[in-house]
Each structure stands twice: as C-alpha cells, then as structure tokens.
Image (tube, grey):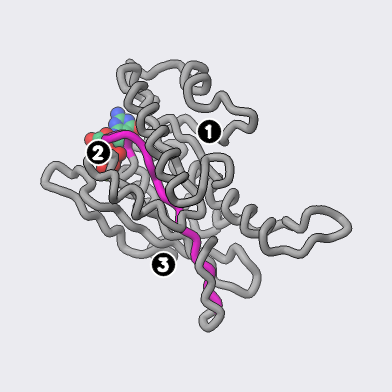
Amino acid sequence: MPSINHDDHTVSFKIVYCGTPLSGKTTNLQQIHAKLDPKGCSDLVSLSNAQDRTLFFDFLAIEADALPGYKTAFHLYTVPGQITYNATLQLVLRQADGVVFVADSQMDRQRDNLQSLQSLEANLRMNGSSLDRLPIVLQYNKRDLPNAAPVEYLEYLFNNRPVPFISFESDAHSGRNVLATLNAISQAVLHQFRLRTAPPSEHGNGAGSYEVPTHALAA
Ligand SMILES: Nc1nc2c(ncn2[C@@H]2O[C@H](COP(=O)(O)OP(=O)(O)OP(=O)(O)O)[C@@H](O)[C@H]2O)c(=O)[nH]1
Ligand SMILES: [Mg+2]
C-alpha cells in the first residue's frame, strides 16, 4: 500500500525497477529525470561504483495531480541487478506498489533475465506479495542492438501467463518508450489503489477514473 500523509495531503507510491545486471534500469531513471519538467521532480540520487554499477539503489521522486485533493508522489527506485546484492533487492522491494521488470533483449542474456525474474518472484513471496498481486510492467530494453531476440520469443519466455503483463519494447539509451513504461506502471498502481480504497458502487467496481501523471512529463 502507498504511504498516505493526511497532514500534508500526500499519497506516495513506490515503484521499483528490477532486472538483470546492465539491462538498463539506471538508464531509465536518467532518461525520466532528463525528460521531466524539473519543477515536478527531485534530483536523481545514484549510489553507484566507479564503473557506474548500482551499489545500493537509484532514487527519483516525481509529483503529479493524479488524485483529487491530494498531492501524489511516485518514488522511483532501481535495484542493483547483481545477485550479490540480493539483500538489497529484498529491502528495496519492501512496500513496493508496482514493479517495472527491465529485461535485456540481447539473445545471450535470456538465461540471466529468467534468473532475475525468478529472484524477483522469490523476493516478492518473502515480502508477502507475488507477481500476480502486484502491478508489473515488462520492458524489453536494448531493442536497438542487432542481437536483440524477437519480441515474440521474449513474450513466450516471460509473459506466457493467464493474465499477461503490459509490455513495451524500448531503447532506454535513446529514451524510446521510457516514459510510456512509466506512464503504464503509474496508471496501474493508481488503478489498484482506487480499487482498494473506493467504496463499491452500483455502476461498477469503484475504480473510477483518474488523471495519469502525463501532464508532469515534458514532451
Ligand atoms: N544499446 C543500448 N544500450 C543501453 C540501453 N539501455 C542501457 N544501455 C547501456 O547499458 C549499460 C548498462 O546500463 P545501466 O542503466 O547502468 O544498467 P543497470 O540495469 O542499471 O545495471 P546494474 O545497476 O549494474 O544492474 C550502460 O552502458 C547503458 O548506456 C539500450 O536500450 N540500448
Ligand atoms: Mg543500475
């Protein structure tokens, strides 16, 4: 559940970017930070080593008018992909309202993607959550590279589920579909929040409509 502060009327959602090492998680946040209106977002905080490998996490907060009467904040985190940092993954995943799974499209990275998805699943379970209960968006990144596997193959590997995840092809390096991915996960967490908090109505499930935070995004 998001954290709700009734004193300053703020609802904060936590979105975590997960995925195999070097799949492009940090690059997503860098692109979001570069494209957003600076008035609507924080500085990008990155805790990385000399080789730009994430050591603990990256963090970026963005604001939007997505819920009437409340300021809405989306706190975006990345986790280090390297398996040695599994404790960090578990810690950062705690209280997550949504996850973007960034897969590396390169053909020789599919085993790593699969391991990373399994590790995500195991860690969610330890936190009392699951891939079925949490809003998840899949991002097939590095589509610009010549050795990118066909998307149909990636869908078969990672999205062959009764209720498929929303998925995007991206090139985070150039920014392609980075904001589309963010928008999709933001909508999904808001939708789940509405479902959980709105009273049932005669005319539907109470999810209602909501503004997506696209107005905060620069073109
Ligand atoms: N060609 C190409 N390179 C990319 C793309 N996205 C990221 N990269 C590059 O891939 C490398 C790793 O990107 P990062 O964003 O640091 O990856 P990460 O997932 O945060 O890595 P860890 O924090 O170590 O798990 C960098 O050199 C990026 O510039 C992409 O879509 N296409
Ligand atoms: Mg990183």
Note whether ligand 1 is within 8 Å of mark 3. no
The structure residue drawn at horizontal position 40% and vertical position 62%, both measured from the top left corner, is 61
The residue that disc 3 covers is: 39
Q: What is the spatial separation of the Cα atoms under label 3 and label 2, in whole angstroms?
A: 33 Å
Can you tell which mark lies on residue 18? none
Q: Residue 167: give its label.
A: 1
Could you tell me if the residues under marks 3 and 2 are in contact, i.e. CB atoms within 8 Å?
Answer: no
Disc 1 within 8 angstroms of ligand 1 (CB):
no
Tag 1: residue type? Ser
Q: Position of residue 99 (x, y in %)?
A: 47, 46
Q: Compared with residue 107, is residue 91 higher up or lower down, i.e. above or below?
A: below
Tag count in the figure? Answer: 3
User: Can you tell me which quadrant of the image ligand 1 is in?
Assistant: top left
Question: From which residue to which does the magenta span run?
Answer: 9-24
Q: Amino acid at mark 3?
A: Lys
Question: Looking at this rendering, what residue extends furthest in the bottom direction?
Answer: 7
- At label 2, the amino acid type is Gln
- Residue behind mark 2: 82
Q: Is residue 149 visible?
A: yes
- Could you tell me which residue is drawn at 14 percent across and 42 percent down? 51
